Image (spheres, rainbow, N blue to C red):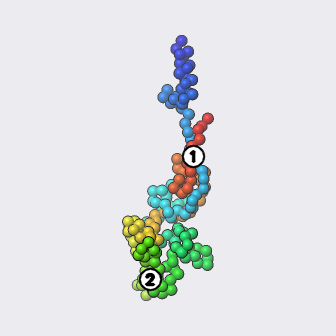
Amino acid sequence: MLSRALRPVIAACFAFGFCAVFGAPACTKTYSCTGDFETKDCAGLDADTCTKVHGCRARKPACMNGCDLGLNCDQTGACAHPADGSCTSLCATAFGESDCNELTASIGGPSLHECEWTTDDTDGGSSCQSVCLPLKNETACTQQAAAGCSWVACEGKVNDDCSSYSGDDCPTFLGCDRTSDAVP
């Protein structure tokens, strides 16, 4: 008699997915990771995210010009493109102190210097370097973002595609999509 009374309850349990309440697994959703990466460069990732992406590795954090990291290379006039096809900061193209000091980034009003002329005490040489290099903390670096500065705590290239990640580990911050599909 009891078993006849439980049959409709068990049928409803499976129909509505409430069986987990009674000790049997309910239908659950699984998640997958699809799409294409917006970038495969690890330099734009923070330290916590870095270790979650295949091919990326943590590095000693530093403030660097984004062009030297391969960031913003497609923005006209933001970076230099030598004959070898690489991407570097405009500082590498300066010929002398006055040329170095003229390299600025417009911020809608006054301009910021992107480069500074420095003298290397070890060999007596001088060079044009990014204003980012002397900055030693993330806050100071972020404040100079208009001059092309980026705080870098990760390096390398992403070496897999989105589908190689589980849905829970899907790097949506790099352009992959976490999608859900019901399990039959």
Amino acid type shown at disc 1 = Thr
Quadrant showing the C terminus: top right
- Mark 2 vs mark 1: which is more N-terminal? 2
Relative height, residue 67 to residue 126 (above, below):
above
Q: x, y percentage for residue 180?
A: 57, 43
Label 1 sits on a secondary structure element that is strand
Amino acid type shown at disc 2 = Asn
Q: x, y percentage for residue 92?
A: 51, 79
The quadrant in which residue 60 appears is bottom left
The answer to whether residue 63 is seen in the rendering is: no
Cβ atoms at labels 2 and 1 below 8 Å apart? no
- Residue at point 54% right, 57% down? 174
Label 2 sits on a secondary structure element that is helix
Instruction: Using residue 69 as the reference point, say whether residue 131 is left or right of it.
Output: left
The quadrant in which residue 158 appears is bottom right
The answer to whether residue 163 is seen in the rendering is: yes
- Residue at point 55% right, 63% down? 41
Q: CA distance from mark 2 to mark 1?
A: 50 Å
Badge number at residue 101 = 2
- Residue at point 52% right, 67% down? 71
Relative height, residue 71 to residue 117 (above, below):
above
